[in-house]
C-alpha cells in the first residue's frame, strides 16, 4: 500500500500497487511523484522504488508535503454509482457473522481496543456535541484494524480534520430529522434511524458530503431494512445489558457493537462480503 502527493499538493491513499499503476497509465502520477510506502515515514520519488523504476519521468510535481497530522485523502466516488454498486452486489446482512467477527477482533487485541474505545466513549459522554468527529474517527480506527492496516490512537481522532464539518453535520442533521420523524408519526423516525446507520463511516471512509452519505446509506440499507432493524435491536439489547452491569459493561459492549457495525460497513462497501456461515 502506498500514499502519494498529487499534482495539487494533496495527499492521497493508501492505495494498492495496482491502482498506483493505473494512475501512472492515466498520467496522474509519474516517476517524480512523491510516494510513501505503508509503514515507512520517508517520502521518495516514485521512480526510486524498484517496482516502479519504469515509471515515466514526467514533470516535477509539488515537493510540498502535507502537515504530518493531515489524514490521507482519496478520490471521492460518485454517490449514485457507489450506492448502485453496493445494491447490485446484494451483500446479505449477516448479524451473527458481524457480531462474531467483532468479538474475535475485540478479544484479539482487547486492552488496546478497549483503551481507545473507552477514551472516545468517555469524551463522548462529556462533550456530546462533537459526537460526529469522535465516532467518525473511531470508525476510521476500527476499519484500519479490520483491514489489517497499522492503527494508532491518532486514527481515532482523525475526524478532527477537514472532515470535521461533514461529520458534525451528519450527526446533527440525522438527529434532527429522526427526531422530527418520531414526533410526526414515530414510524418515519424508526425507518430513518436505521437507514442512516452508515452515514458516519461513509463520510469518514469515502469522503462523501454529509447529505450524500445519508442518501447512500438510506438507499443501500433500505434493501435490507428489516434485517438491519433486527441488527439494531440486538445491538441495543447487548448495550442495555452492559449498562445494567453498573454501566461498566458498556465499555465492552459498546466497542463490540460498534466494531460489528464497522464489519457490516466493510461487507457492504469494502468489497469483502461476510464469510459463509
Image: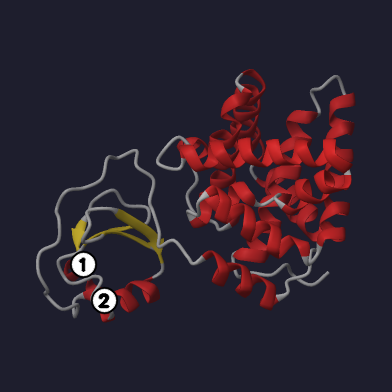
- Examine the rendered structure and indicate whether residue 250 appears above or below residue 156: above
- Examine the rendered structure and indicate whether residue 196 appears above or below residue 237: below
Tell me the residue at 63%/33% (across/down): 117
In this orientation, does residue 158 appear? no
Tell me the residue at 30%/40% (across/down): 68
Q: Which corner quadrant of the image does residue 62 belong to?
A: bottom left
Numbered disc 2: secondary structure: helix
Tell me the residue at 89%/32% (across/down): 241
Please provide percent x and percent y for residue 193.
77, 46
Horizontally, is 27 left or right of 94 in the view?
left
Q: Nearer the viewer, residue 171 or 160?
A: 171
Q: Are dots 1 and 2 in contact, CB under 8 Å?
A: yes
Query: How was the colour assigned to the protein in this rendering?
Result: secondary structure
- Examine the rendered structure and indicate whether residue 239 appears above or below residue 88: above
Please provide percent x and percent y for residue 9.
22, 53
For residue 274, which numbered disc appears in the image? none
Q: Nearer the viewer, residue 217 or 135?
A: 217
Numbered disc 1: secondary structure: helix
Horizontally, is 32 left or right of 125 in the view?
left
Image quadrant occupied by the C terminus: bottom right
Near mark 1 (Cα within 10 A), the count class, few <14, some 14-19 or many ≥20, is many
Near mark 2 (Cα within 10 A), the count class, few <14, some 14-19 or many ≥20, is some
Q: Earlier along the polypeptide chain: callout 1 or callout 2?
A: 2
Q: Nearer the viewer, residue 95 or 115?
A: 95
For residue 46, which numbered disc appears in the image? 1
- Name the residue tied to disc 2: 24
Amino acid at each position: 500500500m502506498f500514499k502519494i502527493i498529487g499534482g495539487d499538493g494533496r495527499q492521497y491513499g493508501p492505495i494498492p500497487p495496482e491502482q498506483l499503476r493505473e494512475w501512472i497509465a492515466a498520467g496522474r502520477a509519474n516517476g517524480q511523484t512523491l510516494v510513501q510506502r505503508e509503514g515507512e515515514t520517508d517520502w521518495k520519488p516514485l521512480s526510486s522504488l524498484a517496482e516502479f523504476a519504469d515509471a515515466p519521468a514526467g514533470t516535477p510535481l509539488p515537493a510540498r508535503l502535507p502537515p504530518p497530522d493531515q489524514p490521507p485523502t482519496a478520490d471521492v466516488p460518485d454517490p449514485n454509482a457507489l450506492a448502485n454498486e453496493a445494491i447490485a452486489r446484494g451483500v446479505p446482512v449477516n448479524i451473527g457473522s458481524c457480531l462474531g467477527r467483532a468479538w474475535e477482533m475485540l478479544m484479539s487485541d482487547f486492552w488496546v481496543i478497549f483503551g481507545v474505545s473507552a477514551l472516545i466513549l468517555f469524551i463522548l459522554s462529556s462533550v456530546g456535541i462533537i459526537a460526529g468527529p469522535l465516532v467518525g474517527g473511531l470508525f476510521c480506527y476500527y476499519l484500519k484494524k479490520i483491514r489489517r492496516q497499522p492503527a494508532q490512537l491518532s486514527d481515532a481522532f482523525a475526524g478532527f480534520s477537514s472532515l470535521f464539518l461533514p461529520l458534525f453535520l451528519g450527526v446533527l442533521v440525522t438527529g434532527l430529522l429522526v427526531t422530527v420523524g418520531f414526533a410526526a408519526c414515530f414510524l418515519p423516525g424508526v425507518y430513518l434511524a436505521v437507514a442512516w446507520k452508515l452515514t458516519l463511516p461513509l463520510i469518514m471512509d469515502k469522503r462523501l458530503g454529509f447529505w450524500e452519505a445519508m442518501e447512500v446509506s438510506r438507499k443501500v440499507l433500505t434493501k435490507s431494512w428489516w434485517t438491519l432493524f433486527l441488527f439494531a435491536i440486538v445491538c441495543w439489547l447487548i448495550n442495555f445489558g452492559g449498562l445494567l452491569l453498573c454501566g461498566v459493561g458498556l465499555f465492552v459492549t459498546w466497542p463490540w457493537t460498534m466494531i460489528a457495525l464497522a464489519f457490516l460497513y466493510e461487507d457492504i462497501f469494502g468489497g469483502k462480503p461476510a464469510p459463509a456461515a
